[in-house]
Image (cartoon, helix red, strand yellow):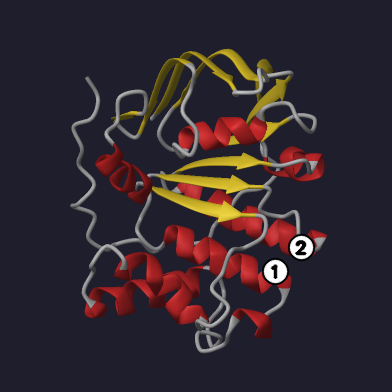
């Protein structure tokens, strides 16, 4: 769960990026974050990922108190998240397989477990047969699928997608949002920042409008999209416990 209580963020130059935010996002919710450029959307995501620390208030993400979390615990917080970036952030010298597997290797998962899990997520995102290719051999949409697969590899409780369709064409944008919807339907919390209102209207869910650092609208839009696709996710997930919340 995500809980923000009276959260404000003031940068060192005096810019007040967020003002007295109160917000709860429940497990399994699909949430769009929308609003004009400079409204505070990116700051909101940075607070959730603990790339920035709030100036005031209380933030709980997946059981971690981000106002009190010790530096050594931050990597454990981030293991509960999968991040999908607009610019993909793939490692060019690595294959599709190794880009996806990398997130499991850094936390010491056995290669046998990695091989099984990578095979699952490659199938999920529709990249079968492309596991040996490098990012420069893929289309933009395919690269974003690799980014999504990498975000999913460690069975995160939360997916954060920052303008995930900003660098791909409309058809591929729909595919990426469809996959995020499938993931959400199976119980993972998904938070998407986007400027593409057509996708918001198509996929629906909870929509938060941020403007001038404040949440000015919080509403639910019924989805026009319903998935019948399976989400295979049966790997071990026993290493996510934490005791950070006071």
Q: Real-space Cα distance between discs 2 and 1?
A: 6 Å
| Residue 176 image point, x, y percent | 64, 59
- Asked if residue 103 can be seen in this view, the reply is yes
Quadrant of the image containing the C terminus: top left
Mark 1, other Cα within 10 Å: few <14 / some 14–19 / many ≥20 = many
Quadrant in the picture for residue 14:
top right
Between 203 and 32, the one lying in front of the other is 32
Q: Which residue is mark 2?
A: 168
Q: Is residue 231 above or below residue 162?
A: below
Quadrant in the picture for residue 35:
top right
Residue, x 71% and y 55% (percent of image)?
165
Q: Which residue is mark 1?
A: 141
| Residue 111 image point, x, y percent | 25, 79
Q: Which mark is residue 88?
A: none
Name of the residue lying farthest toward the front? 13
Instruction: Give yes or no for contact between labels 2 and 1 (Cβ–Cβ under 8 Å).
Output: yes
Q: Is residue 87 above or below residue 18?
A: below
| Residue 93 image point, x, y percent | 54, 83
Is residue 16 toward the left or the right of residue 123 in the image?
right
Is residue 100 toward the left or the right of residue 136 in the image?
left
Q: Is residue 76 above or below residue 62?
A: below
Q: Is residue 185 above or below residue 152?
A: above
- Asked if residue 30 can be seen in this view, the reply is no
Mark 2, other Cα within 10 Å: few <14 / some 14–19 / many ≥20 = some
Between 191 and 184, the one lying in front of the other is 191
- Along the polypeptide, which appears first: circle 2 or circle 1? 1
Is residue 133 toward the left or the right of residue 51 in the image?
right
SS assignment at label 2: loop
Residue, x 20% and y 42% (percent of image)?
241
């Amino acid at each position: 769960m995500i809980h923000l209580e009276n959260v404000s963020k003031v940068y060192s130059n005096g810019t007040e990026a967020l003002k007295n935010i109160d917000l709860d996002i429940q497990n399994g919710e699909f949430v769009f974050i929308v609003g004009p450029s400079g409204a505070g959307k990116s700051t909101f995501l940075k607070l959730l990922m603990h790339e920035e620390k709030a100036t005031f208030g209380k933030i709980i993400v997946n059981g971690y108190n981000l106002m009190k979390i010790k530096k050594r615990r931050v990597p454990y917080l981030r293991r509960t998240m999968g991040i999908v970036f607009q610019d993909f952030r793939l490692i060019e010298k690595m294959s599709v397989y190794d880009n996806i597997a990398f997130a499991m290797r850094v936390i010491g998962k056995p290669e046998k477990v990695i091989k099984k899990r990578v095979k699952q997520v490659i199938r999920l995102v529709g990249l079968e047969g492309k596991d040996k290719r490098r990012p420069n051999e893929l289309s933009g949409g395919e690269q974003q699928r690799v980014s999504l697969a990498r975000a999913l590899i460690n069975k995160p409780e939360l997916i954060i997608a920052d303008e995930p369709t900003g660098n791909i064409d409309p058809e591929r944008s729909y595919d990426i949002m469809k996959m995020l919807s499938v993931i959400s339907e199976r119980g993972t919390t998904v938070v998407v920042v986007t400027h593409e209102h057509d996708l918001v209207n198509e996929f629906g869910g909870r929509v938060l409008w941020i403007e001038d650092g404040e949440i000015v609208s919080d509403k639910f839009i019924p989805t026009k999209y319903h998935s019948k696709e399976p989400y295979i996710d049966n790997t071990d997930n026993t290493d996510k416990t934490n005791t950070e919340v006071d």
